[in-house]
Image (cartoon, helix red, strand yellow):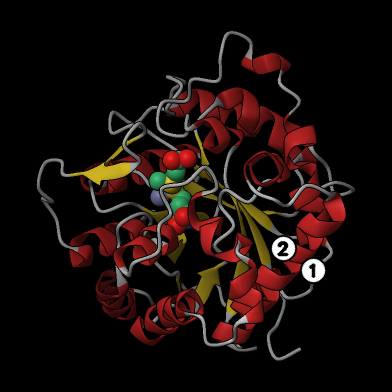
């Protein structure tokens, strides 16, 4: 394989900060793909013509997104599989069986790998349980979130991703609820058998979207002590408000100083879950240059952008990473 294991890479290059790509789903949308569907950015891949017609327009758009994020400086990129859980796919598309589902995931991962080449790292993206019911930005998991069988929900995607050598790292992204976080942390190496990270969905006030404080979250992680799954490589926040992202990172770093962090905020807009569109919010008070400097000082090892960030954002992030990291 052309690349080392990501765990080995981060350990043997302790000053290296990797540049991640930007908001894949929103970038596909900007370029004309309709992702306002129950499967979000999986939409282009569930159409047969995407695979049978090698010159399909959607194929060119997806390739273009990978290519432009790579050229902008991304060294680690994600599959567009945020809302590709078996539940979301089987309830909303013509794909119904586990066999068909595995074929879909295998195709998407191989296509993504072909787009980025063998040198760059590829993340298998998994959205939260709440993505299916559009609760990733309010953390509302119903009356008894503690009773939900999160493993049953994630298992088909996990089984596929953990067996796919094209993937270097697995992402649990935009996790808004502490019960879901507790469940993920409770799974040992027999379930989460290769490197993974957890990206928390946090409110601009610094709390997890369900209202749990960052202290609650860090305490929960500390409570695992040395029983924590050694494959948990990084913790962080994603799709957080741009303006507040560095404050939140610093607060996590203060409480978990030895935890390698990952951060990729959105561009400050707010997602309207009914219209399935991004709405403008207050303006951005900082530049990427200022934020990236603070992220690195607060222990970030991977930095990128989430929804509505573009290749131009990644270019600015890459320049700032070059300026402020010692790699
Ligand atoms: C804006 S994306 C990160 C989330 C999409 C949402 N789960 C939906 O289904 O509309
Ligand atoms: N990485 C996801 C969004 C997470 S909020 C995507 O771009 O679709
Ligand atoms: Zn996002």
Q: Secondary structure at mark 1?
A: loop
Decide which of 326, 268 is in the foreground and name it.
268
**Residue behind mark 1:** 164
Ligand 2 lies under 8 Å from the Cβ of mark 1: no
Residue 264 locus on image (x, y percent): 39, 56
- At 56% across and 57% down in the image, what residue appears? 42
Q: Residue at x 60, y 82 (%)?
A: 53
Q: Which tag, 2 or 1, sits closer to the chain's start? A: 2
Q: Quadrant of residue 274?
A: top left
Q: Most extreme residue toward the top, as rendered?
A: 143
Q: From the viewer's perspective, is 283 left or right of 21?
A: left
Residue 124 location, quadrant: bottom right
Ligand 1 quadrant assignment: top left
The quadrant of the picture occupied by the C terminus is bottom left
Q: Which mark is residue 298?
A: none
Does residue 198 appear anywhere in the picture? Answer: no
Q: Position of residue 320 (x, y in %)?
A: 27, 74
Q: Does mark 2's beta carbon lie closer than 8 Å to ligand 2?
A: no
Taking depth in this image into account, of 302 and 39 the one nearest to the observer is: 39
Question: At which x and y percent is residue 317?
Answer: 30, 71
| Residue plotted at (35% across, 41% down) | 276
Q: Which residue position holds label 2?
A: 105
Marks 2 and 1 close (CB-CB < 8 Å): yes
Residue 80 appears in the picture as rendered: yes
Q: Position of residue 252 (x, y in %)?
A: 44, 40
Q: Nearer the viewer, residue 285 or 111?
A: 111
**Foreground of the two, 125 or 195:** 125
Circle 1 packing at 10 Å, graded few (<14), some (14-19), many (20+), is some
């Amino acid at each position: 394989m052309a690349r080392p294991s990501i765990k080995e890479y981060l350990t043997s290059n302790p000053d290296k900060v990797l540049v991640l790509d930007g908001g894949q789903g929103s970038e596909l949308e900007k370029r004309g793909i309709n992702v306002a569907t129950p499967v979000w950015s999986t939409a282009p891949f569930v159409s047969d013509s995407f695979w049978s017609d090698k010159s399909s327009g959607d194929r060119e758009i997806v390739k273009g997104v990978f290519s432009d994020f790579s050229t902008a400086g991304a060294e680690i990129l994600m599959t567009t599989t945020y809302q590709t859980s078996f539940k979301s796919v089987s309830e909303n598309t013509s794909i119904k069986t586990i066999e068909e589902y595995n074929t879909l995931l295998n195709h998407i991962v191989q296509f993504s790998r072909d787009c980025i080449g063998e040198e760059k790292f590829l993340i298998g993206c998994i959205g939260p349980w709440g993505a299916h019911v559009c609760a990733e930005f309010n953390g509302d998991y119903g009356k008894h979130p503690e009773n939900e069988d999160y493993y049953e929900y994630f298992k088909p995607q996990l089984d596929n991703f953990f067996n796919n050598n094209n993937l270097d790292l697995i992402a649990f992204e935009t996790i808004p609820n502490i019960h879901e976080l507790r469940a993920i942390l409770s799974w040992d190496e027999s379930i989460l058998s290769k490197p993974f990270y957890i990206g928390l969905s946090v409110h601009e006030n610094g709390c997890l979207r369900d209202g749990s404080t960052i202290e609650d979250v860090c305490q929960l992680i500390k409570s695992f002590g040395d029983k924590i799954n050694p494959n948990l490589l990084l913790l962080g926040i994603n799709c957080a408000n741009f303006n507040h992202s560095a404050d939140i990172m610093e607060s996590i770093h203060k409480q978990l100083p030895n935890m390698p962090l990952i951060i990729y905020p959105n561009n400050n807009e707010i997602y309207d879950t009914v219209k399935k569109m991004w709405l403008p919010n207050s303006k951005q008070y900082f530049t990427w240059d200022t934020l990236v400097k603070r992220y690195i000082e607060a222990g970030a090892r991977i930095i990128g952008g989430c929804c509505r960030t573009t290749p131009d954002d990644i270019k600015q992030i890459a320049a700032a990473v070059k300026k402020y990291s010692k790699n």
